[in-house]
Amino acid sequence: MLTNADITLYSRRMNLQTKQAGYISLVIEHVSWYSSCDVTAVAGGLVSSDTYRIRIPEKAFIDGKPALDGYLSPSDYQAEPEGHWTVENGDYFCLGKGPEIDKPSDLGKYHLIYGQVRSLRDNRRGGLPHIRIEGWR
């Protein structure tokens, strides 16, 4: 699989001390990034949106460690979050190494290419193991 980018995932997590939702950032290096512009006809005109497909392969890294080694499905992550990571629908991502954020609207302030996770597939079985994320903005 051709890897052409690094990404930052922003996972929404509840801060147990402040009881406020916040975002934890996670930089993943050596992923496959594909983007396209989709146009849809609606009453009164056309609407365009950017669509993103991200594949996190075996050769992707988080802090120098293989990314897939620490991945757990969202349901498994709830039981064992320490030392692991996950991604869920509703999380955010940006192209490259992004900043720390308090809320998703902060991403727009930095003029980043970013989107929201809308679909997730665990394709770690088979000849080309990877996690596939689809999203749009």
Image (tube, rainbow, N blue to C red):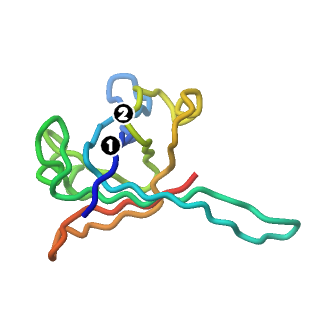
Horizontal relation, residue 33 to residue 103: left or right: left
Q: Is residue 103 above or below residue 41?
A: above
Q: Nearer the viewer, residue 118 or 128?
A: 128
Q: Is residue 84 above or below residue 98?
A: below
- Residue with the mark numbered 2: 97
Please tell me whether mark 2 sits on a helix, a strand or a loop: loop
Q: Position of residue 95 (x, y in %)?
A: 42, 42
Quadrant of image for the N terminus: bottom left
Q: Residue furthest top?
A: 18
- Graded by Cα atoms within 10 Å as few (under 14), some (14 to 19) or many (20 or more), the crowding at tag 1 reads many
Marking on residue 6: 1
Q: Is residue 14 above or below residue 77?
A: above
Residue at position x 16%, y 53% in the image? 59
Q: Position of residue 24 (x, y in %)?
A: 34, 34
Identify which amino acid the numbered label 1 is placed on: Asp
Q: Position of residue 135 (x, y in %)?
A: 48, 57
Question: Disc 1 to disc 2, how far (Cα)?
Answer: 7 Å
Q: Is residue 12 above or below residue 2?
A: above
